[in-house]
């Protein structure tokens, strides 16, 4: 028999932990550069529509599976499908995705922590143009000792939290880190929009130019909605499994989605006004935060201080995401193999660290090792975020809409809510059964084929 499962201490604890999973590098690093490369406000509008018709319904479906089954992804699908091998394997695909994503995500998270240390050491104080910042970044990220050291450090922090369990580890961390994150972010937004010349950047974010929209934009927006909400691999399912059946599931899901979206938008307001104020172009691409930003801070008043705040913010956002990935695999190993949590976290931490080594070295000694034309890091990211997550998302939707079925799903969904609107329930049903899976399928096919 299994020991009694841990639970969230409060509803707000669950919301903050799940929002912490969702809010991460996807919001602060990826979202702004996608906005910058794809037409500003017009991209934001498409993104918001994707969140509403695919993101939110899928978040509800995923949390619902977990809360109903009260188990890890594998155990949950097994239970609700009455031991179907196929559906159990779908849960297994989520756990597998957890390993893959954590292995390379943790490398980037390590860089963020490394940049906090470098900022404190004053490494950036003489860097005053993006080219110099780029060179510095290339030097650091290709240095095995630096990149592996911070990869290890970040894994130790992740394991250190998961070791203490759901309410004692994850919930405590989320309750401390999330308010701080919001505070830091607001400080940086205020810093950005009060710079001289910031107005142009604000206009860029609110005035849509629809000529910038094409089918690629739509695909990118939908894919980003998925990654940003931590959907499709069982992170929200696992967090949902520690949720009380007395809490309002739809209301919690809505809060998670609103928080995640608000932070992505705030990240836009953190970067673009400052970029425009300093006369830089918005389309800086993925290199924005490590190549350009460190130099940018030297041109603004109190920049050194805000640079530390910025990289701390990134590290905290990444940490609340790495712990959710770690929790998925930990829940699986403790529940399916009866391992103790403490033993499991340490073994898994070492294992995932090793799995991440080729990704970490992909920017240095292993940069010429290519698989399918990409570095190890590139393959891991592409495979996880472009294939495993959307595929997992489709299966979650099909499972709730058709296999487990709405007849079972709806009563479980409304358990814990005092009022519910029949119209909204019907809209959710139609989105889950038809619209969302078809849209995600289209995205997946385009990404694989194109
Ligand atoms: N949502 C996280 C981010 O935006 C990434 C993530 C994906 C975390 C999947 C957990 C699971 O950075």
Image: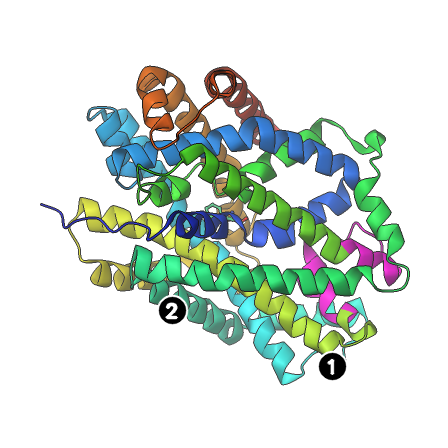
* Residue at figure coordinates x 26%, y 62% from the top left: 347
User: Would you say the residues marked 2 and 1 are in contact, meaning their CB atoms lie under 8 Å apart?
Assistant: no
Question: Of the residues under marks 2 and 1, which one precedes in the sequence?
Answer: 1
The secondary structure type at the circle numbered 2 is helix
Q: Name, please, the residue furthest toward the bottom.
A: 121
On the rendered image, what quadrant is the N terminus found in? top left
Is 304 on the left-hand or right-hand side of 427?
right
* Residue at figure coordinates x 79%, y 45% from the top left: 205
The verdict on label 1 being within 8 Å of ligand 1 is no
Q: Name, please, the residue furthest toward the left.
A: 1
Q: Is residue 108 visible?
A: no
Q: Is residue 283 magenta?
A: yes
Disc 1 crowd rating (10 Å Cα; few below 14, some 14-19, many 20+) is some
Q: Name, please, the residue furthest toward the front.
A: 418
Q: Label 2 to label 1, Cα distance in Å?
A: 29 Å
* Residue at figure coordinates x 65%, y 60% from the top left: 185
- Which residue is label 2 attached to? 156
* Residue at figure coordinates x 57%, y 78% from the top left: 117
Residue 11: x and y in percent read 39, 47
Q: Nearer the viewer, residue 98 or 184?
A: 184
Total count of labels: 2
- Which residue is label 1 attached to? 125
The secondary structure type at the circle numbered 1 is loop
Q: Which residues are magenta?
A: 272-296
Is 332 on the left-hand or right-hand side of 437?
left
**Could you tell me what secondary structure mostly forms the magenta stretch?**
helix
| Colour theme | rainbow
Q: Is residue 129 above or below residue 168?
A: below
Disc 2 crowd rating (10 Å Cα; few below 14, some 14-19, many 20+) is some
Residue 289: x and y in percent read 68, 61
Q: Is residue 135 visible?
A: yes
Q: Nearer the viewer, residue 103 or 357?
A: 103
């Amino acid at each position: 028999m299994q020991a009694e499962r841990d639970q969230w201490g409060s509803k707000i604890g669950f919301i903050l932990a799940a929002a912490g999973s969702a809010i991460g590098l996807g919001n602060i690093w990826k979202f702004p550069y996608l906005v910058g490369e794809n037409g500003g406000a017009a991209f934001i509008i498409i993104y918001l529509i994707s969140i509403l018709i695919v993101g939110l319904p899928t978040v509800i479906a995923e949390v619902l599976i977990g809360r109903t089954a009260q188990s890890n992804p594998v155990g949950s699908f097994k239970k609700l499908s009455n031991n179907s091998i196929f559906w159990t394997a779908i849960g297994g695909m989520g756990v597998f995705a957890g390993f893959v994503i954590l292995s390379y995500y943790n490398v980037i998270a390590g860089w963020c922590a490394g940049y906090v240390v470098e900022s404190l050491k004053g490494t950036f104080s003489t860097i005053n143009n993006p080219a110099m910042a780029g060179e510095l970044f290339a030097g650091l990220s290709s240095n095995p000792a630096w990149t592996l050291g911070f990869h290890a450090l970040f894994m130790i922090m992740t394991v250190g939290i998961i070791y203490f369990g759901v309410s004692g580890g994850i919930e405590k961390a989320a309750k401390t880190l999330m308010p701080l994150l919001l505070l830091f972010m607001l400080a940086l937004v205020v810093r950005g929009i009060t710079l001289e010349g910031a107005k142009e950047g604000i206009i860029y974010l609110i005035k849509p130019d629809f000529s910038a929209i094409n089918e690629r934009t739509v695909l990118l927006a939908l894919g980003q909605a998925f990654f940003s909400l931590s959907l499709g691999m069982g992170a929200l399912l696992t967090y949902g499994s520690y949720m009380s059946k007395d809490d309002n599931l739809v209301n919690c899901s809505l809060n998670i989605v609103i928080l995640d979206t608000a932070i992505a938008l705030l990240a836009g307001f953190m970067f673009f006004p400052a970029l425009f104020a300093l006369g830089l172009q918005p389309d800086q691409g993925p290199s924005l935060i490590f190549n350009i930003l460190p130099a940018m801070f030297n041109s603004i008043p109190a920049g050194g201080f805000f640079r530390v705040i910025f990289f701390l913010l990134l590290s905290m956002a990444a940490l609340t995401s790495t712990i959710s990935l770690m929790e998925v695999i930990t829940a699986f190993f403790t529940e399916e193999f009866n391992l103790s949590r403490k033993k499991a976290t340490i073994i898994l931490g070492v294992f995932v660290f090793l799995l991440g080594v080729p990704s970490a070295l992909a920017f240095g000694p292993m940069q010429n090792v290519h698989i399918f034309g990409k570095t190890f890091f590139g393959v891991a990211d592409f495979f996880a975020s472009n294939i495993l997550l959307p595929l997992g998302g489709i299966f979650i939707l099909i499972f709730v809409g058709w296999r487990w079925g709405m007849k079972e799903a709806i009563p479980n969904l409304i358990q814990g809510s005092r009022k519910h609107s029949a119209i909204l329930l019907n809209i959710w049903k139609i989105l889950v059964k038809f619209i969302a899976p078809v849209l995600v399928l289209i995205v997946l096919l385009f990404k694989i084929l194109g």
